[in-house]
Each structure stands twice: as structure tokens, then as C-alpha cells.
Amino acid sequence: MSAMTWEHSGAMVRGRDARPLHLTARGRKVVTTLAVVLALAVGLVGGRAMASSPEEGIAVDVYTVGAGESLWSIAAGRTAPGADVRDTMDALRDLNELSSSALAAGQQLLVPVASD
């Protein structure tokens, strides 16, 4: 028969053959599951980044460059009266990610839809 005694630390010890506390296989599964759920919750909520755009997207058409056309001629045809054609050229160059204003016949460009 074994006697239950109290140690000074307040832990209950069964006789003199006290062993350190260990987790069973089921306990390890529970602890692992809780750790995974916690990590997912932190990853989904804590690591969320919000992106915003200062402006809305613009409507575009696809324009196929004809023989002998230049970026200047295309921009001039889409520039409002009194506006600077160079600004339209810059906008077309940025929109199509062109490194220069050189174009080839058959090349397709994105151009903003003309507003009436």
C-alpha cells in the first residue's frame, strides 16, 4: 500500500518513487494541434497587409500600330485640344512600360478609352 504525502513545494508525491511529469501521445497531439491553430490564427490575422490604390483603374483599348506610325502620331490623335502631346506620350509610355518611343508595325499598345 502506498501512502500519499505532501512535499514542501505543495506537489503531491506518491511514496518515494516520484517521476517527472510527461505527456502522453494524446497530450502531445492536443498540444501540437493547439500550437498549429494558434500559429495559423496569428498568421492569418496578424500578417494581413492591406493594399489600396490612390486612384481607380482606367478603361483601355488595344491599339495595333500601323506601318509608319509613331508614338507621337498616336498620342497626338488622343490628346485633347490645348493639351500637351508630350504628356500623352509619357502616359502611353508608362501604361505600356516602354523603355523608348520606338514602335514596330503590328505592335499592340494599351491606350486609354477616349472620353466623350
Image (tube, grey):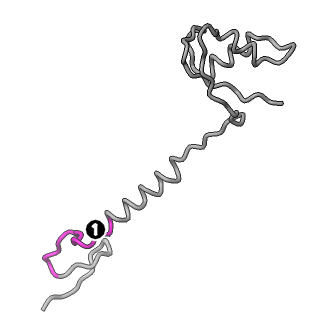
Dividing the picture into quadrants, the one containing residue 106 is top right
Q: Which type of secondary structure does the marked residue at label 1 adopt? A: helix
Q: Report the side of 29 relative to 107 (left or right).
A: left
Name the residue tied to disc 1.
29
Dividing the picture into quadrants, the one containing residue 113 is top right
Residue 55 lies, with reference to residue 40, above or below; the image says above
* 56 inside magenta stretch: no
Question: What's the residue at 28%, 71% (across, down)?
Answer: 27
Nearer-the-camera pick, 94 or 60:
60
Residue 73 lies, with reference to residue 96, above or below; the image says above
Q: Report the side of 56 relative to 35 (left or right).
A: right
Query: Residue 102's x, y, as percent?
Result: 57, 8
- In the displayed image of the protein, which residue is found farthest to the bottom? 1
Q: Report the side of 108 relative to 29 (left or right).
A: right
Nearer-the-camera pick, 71 or 34:
71
Q: Which residues are magenta?
A: 15-31
Nearer-the-camera pick, 104 or 17:
104
Query: Residue 4's x, y, as percent?
Result: 22, 86
Query: Residue 71's x, y, as percent?
Result: 65, 11
Question: What's the residue at 68%, 35% (across, down)?
Answer: 57
Dividing the picture into quadrants, the one containing residue 111 is top right
